[in-house]
Amino acid sequence: MPSTRELRRGDAPVALPARAFDCLAYLVENRQRAVGRDELIAAVWGRVEVSDALLGHTIVKIRRSLGDTGNEQRTIRTVPRFGYRWTLPVEVLSGVGDAPVVGADELLASTPATPPADSPARDAATAARRSRRLALAAVAIAAIVLAMVLAVVAASRVRERAGSLAGRDAAGLVVPAEETMAAPAMVLPADIDAPADAQWLRFGVMDLVASRLRAGAFPAMPSESVVSVLRQRAAAGGDDDVLHDPALAELAAHRILPRVSLAAGRWRVRLDLFGAQRTFEVEAIDDDAIVAARNAADELLRRLGRTPAAIADRPPGLDELLQRSGAAMLADQLAQARELIAAAPPTLQQHPSLEHRMAQIELRSGENDAAEARMHALLDRGGPALPEALRVRAMLTLAAAQVRSGRTALTGDLYDEAIALGTRLGDHEVLGVARLGRGTVYAQEGRYDEATSMLSRARTELAAVADGLGVASVDVSLGDFLLMQHRPAEALSQIEGAVRQFERLGAREARAYALASLVAAQLELGDGDAALATSERFEPVELQTNNQRARWILARARAEALAGAGRVAAAEAVLARIDAQSDPRRDAVVRAQAASAAARIAYGRGDLEAARTALARALAPPMREEDAIGWTRALLLRAQVELAAGDLAAATSTVTALRDAAAAAQDDWRRMYAAAAEASLAAAEGRREPALELFAKAMRTAERQNVPADLVAIGVPYLEQLVEAGRLDTAQVVSGRIAGWVAHEARGAAAQARLFRALGEEEAARAVEQAFARRGTQLPDGTAQPH
């Protein structure tokens, strides 16, 4: 029946995510014609800015569920440069409403229970959904994105999966990252006694042994974490005795050093294990270094009381190519990894495992669109025949590409499917990364309890495989969720713990993004000086990551910190570089956020034309979709700029937009900003008493929430109106409430100077102005001139 929303093959139900089901139903309903992409997107998602990539992935899922592929197209045919059409015969059965039966063995027993795309009900539902989606403000979303990517890259190499531990359903409160127990094992880079062309085995054998240990249910630290730790150790002047290093013993109960040698054409791999309770060695010899390393790892597992996993049947040369390319990635030699795959025979290059490896390389290089397209093609071409362990990792890599492109909210179905597959496989890595991603999407939807529960479970899964990097990434995400809930003081503590864990692991890139998130929390707390000091810890950004997309995220955080500390000229220089050099499409969200920061600076010094120009760039769809908090603040700023410019008509339109968004969202924070905007509009219209009442209402909410950034945003215009109205007693109260956080805020300082003059305290007013003049900053009323 239509109300059951079921897809069946014979009597058996076929699982299909809600969006994919709606898409299938719409195509079947309109089977007499081809359906355009834009029409399909509007009908299913209720908005037009959904990417073609998401639609393509949805079609892939539908085809797979029906046993079809992109090559065969027996059920859904792609109409080039237009859209899709349902091609299978359909029979409408009597007695079941208007539900059609599809083909001989697929029964579609429902139609989408969604209003048409152009209906008022659909528009209202879409607006409400958008308004509830609180995206990560400032650097917060960047931190989650990069933490997700790091976790995915650490977990997504293709490994044999047999006999791994079953996933647990533990959920609850998380603990600080530094309280995580030491990993059972750390496999070190191998000592190589062989010709120079075999030096790739240094990382290749390390990674192979660690993977075999994990596949045999003996958790070992991810190789990326080990390499980071050792680089940090070398930079600090550590000695050569890694097996007995107490600092490494804190990270792993057992240190394992592979020793690889070649003699008379035979490879010998010896594994030396050192721990507090036992020390021993195992070895294996073979004509093939990979086989010898695998056999040695399996013997080590037996000595540890574990059963080695079954060995997958692979084409000749594939294992070596995967290990060699993986070793190049561990050494940050992405170009070499590409060259290795490009030089392989075409039949080997097309193997799904190498397609996935290429997507990883593209992801690490910042080529997010290329990685996304490659994984779409792999999932489409492979269909149900693709091994589940590889398919689920391809889904996570696809999701990571979408996250890095700023489309986190589009990945929910991918994460749901990955969680289902990971549960069936009993794969902790998959479950940890997928739940981390799903929790992020829940948070964007404002479903914080579900988000926290999901991330707590992610933390448990990642801790089970000794992925300290993944655990710390979860902690950063939890801190970001607290920021999204306007709880920066709690977020600060959570993120600081993750930063310490990243530093222990030598995770340079992950640490940089955790620090960027820390900057966001400190700015919310009104501590610009602390934010500036934190940003110094990831400068220069070029040394933190090779990914240009990621560098712009860090640069924007640096600019925000500079502005928060009153170093306006330096902040504007960074923002101008982002605007001039970043990619308009791939860096759209960062560019919009940077433009919003530039607008705040321009408004602070009274340059209304520059502020309006910057806001036109800031208030673009990417900002609205991915940073609802930043979008709301930019709307309030636009209303204030328009009112200052005397454009009441434009300001009225902006205030209406804020009011409508607050009504749909139904949260106090957005209502507070809407009330402040309405108050400013009422004041401009000469309705002084209603304006002051609205400001007082907004200020009460800000005081209740007690976030310094919000207190300043509401308190400064309120103070301006109180001084103008001659309400000096109340003005002094408001001034005192925000005084501790406006030392570097131009409009706040100007308002306080005006209050001092109204009170007859000329010396105090001049001191405020001179403080800004010494920094070369002009206050918006022109009272302070730069030297």
Image: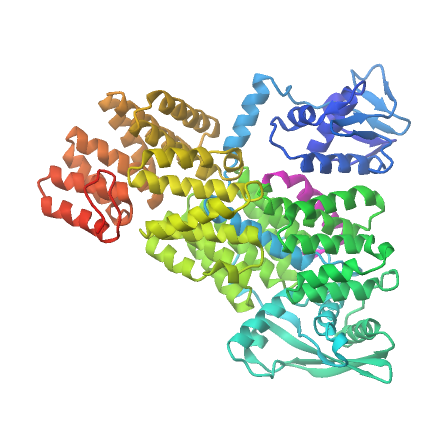
Q: Going by the image, does 319 lie left or right of 677?
A: right
Magenta stretch secondary structure, dominant:
helix
Q: Magenta stretch: residue 412 in it?
A: yes
Residue 564 seen from this side? no
Asked if residue 363 can be seen in this view, the reply is yes
436 in magenta: no
Determine whether, in the image, residue 164 is placed left or right of residue 574. Answer: right
Q: Is 284 above or below relative to 375?
A: below
Say how many tags the image has: 0
Please identify the residue farthest to the left as the structure is shown: 760
Report x, y in % for residue 51.
64, 35
Q: Quadrant of residue 605?
A: top left
Q: In this view, does 526 lie to the left or right of 333?
A: left
Q: Where is residue 538 in the image (x, y as percent from the top left)?
A: 46, 60
Which segment did they paint magenta?
A: 409-429
Q: Is 616 on the left or on the right of 461, as rendered? A: left
Residue 384, percent from left and from top? 83, 44
- Does residue 345 sit above or below 96 in this rendering? below
Q: Position of residue 105 (x, y in %)?
A: 89, 29
Kindly indicate the quadrant of the structure image that contains residue 440.
top right
Q: Which quadrant of the figure contains the N terminus?
A: top right
Residue at the spot 16% in from the left edge and 32% down from the top edge: 727
Q: Which of 400 and 598 is in front in this view?
A: 598
